[in-house]
Image (tube, helix red, strand yellow):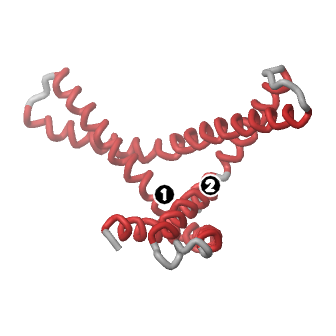
């Protein structure tokens, strides 16, 4: 097994066992790092524009950087929710268009963007946007399980045999989804505290 297969096997196992947790922690770390960088940049702009002395400059930079990190953590949830809604909207619109096109093909009609077709596309987009908003955790669990299982089936020789590959992939996706839904999501601090 070469280095790439080892890395993909480790990554695949990590995604199958804790993809939701990796996503949950990763988004918060990225948001905090982005907030730190933006806060630092804002601090530098304040220092340069106000001409603050070198004695107070460290305090201004530290304050702006800390506030930026907090702002990043506070904004991570709305930003990720918006991105999920946007992706759900686009996916729903795509499904609505493909479904309409298939319907027209079955009926033997020429496809065109009529008012009813646009209504179906927008309706499908709205439904999938709402689903994406409320099912973020489960969407990420399915995505990380799918990717992790794919990596494992590609890189573990016993799983990559042609006669076992579809069964191994399906079993890994289902097992990873079940594991993450039952165990991993119970460990994540994603519930409001009382």
Quadrant in which the C terminus is drawn: bottom right
Residue 170 x, y percent position in the rendering: 64, 69
In the rendered image of this protein, does residue 19 appear above or below residue 37? below
Left or right: where 183 falls relative to 74: right
- Please tell me which residue is depicted at 13% across the width and 36% down the height of the picture: 56
Who is closer to the viewer here, 180 or 64? 180
* In the image, farthest residue toward the bottom: 158
Q: Position of residue 73 (x, y in %)?
A: 42, 47
- Disc 1 crowd, CA 10 A, few/some/many (<14, 14-19, 20+): some
- Relative height, residue 117 to residue 99 (above, below): above
How far is disc 2 from disc 1 in space, using C-alphas?
A: 13 Å
**Are dots 2 and 1 in contact, CB under 8 Å?**
no
Q: Residue furthest right?
A: 107
Q: Is residue 165 above or below residue 142?
A: below
- Give the side of residue 102 with respect to residue 78, left or right: right
Image mark for residue 24 = 1
| Element class at badge 2 | helix
Rendering coords of residue 112 (x, y %):
80, 22
Residue 102: x, y in percent? 81, 37
**Secondary element type, mark 1:** helix
Q: Residue furthest left?
A: 54
In this view, the residue in front, 165 or 96, is: 165
Q: Is residue 179 left or right of residue 50?
A: right
Give the residue pinned by disc 2.
Answer: 139
Q: Is there any visible trace of residue 189 in the rendered image?
A: no
Estimate how packed mark 2 is, as few (under 14), some (14 to 19) or many (20 or more) residues with alpha carbons within 10 Å: some
Q: Nearer the viewer, mark 2 or mark 1?
A: 2
The residue that appears at 52% across and 60% down in the rendered structure is 147
């Amino acid at each position: 097994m070469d280095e790439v297969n080892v890395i993909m096997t480790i990554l695949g196992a990590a995604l199958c066992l804790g993809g939701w947790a990796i996503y949950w922690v990763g988004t918060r770390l990225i948001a905090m790092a982005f907030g730190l960088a933006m806060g630092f940049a804002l601090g530098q702009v304040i220092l340069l524009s106000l001409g603050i002395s070198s004695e107070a400059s460290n305090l201004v930079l530290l304050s702006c950087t800390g506030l930026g990190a907090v702002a990043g953590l506070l904004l991570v949830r709305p930003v990720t929710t918006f991105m999920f809604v946007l992706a759900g909207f686009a996916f729903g619109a795509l499904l609505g268009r493909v479904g309409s096109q298939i319907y027209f093909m079955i009926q033997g009609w020429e496809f065109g963007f009529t008012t009813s077709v646009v209504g179906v596309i927008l309706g499908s987009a709205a439904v999938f946007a709402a689903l994406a908003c409320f099912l973020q955790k489960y969407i990420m669990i399915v995505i990380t399980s799918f990717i992790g299982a794919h990596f494992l089936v590609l890189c573990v020789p016993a799983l990559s045999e042609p006669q076992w590959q579809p069964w191994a992939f399906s079993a890994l996706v289902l097992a990873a989804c079940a594991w993450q839904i039952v165990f991993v999501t119970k460990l994540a601090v994603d519930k409001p505290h009382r």
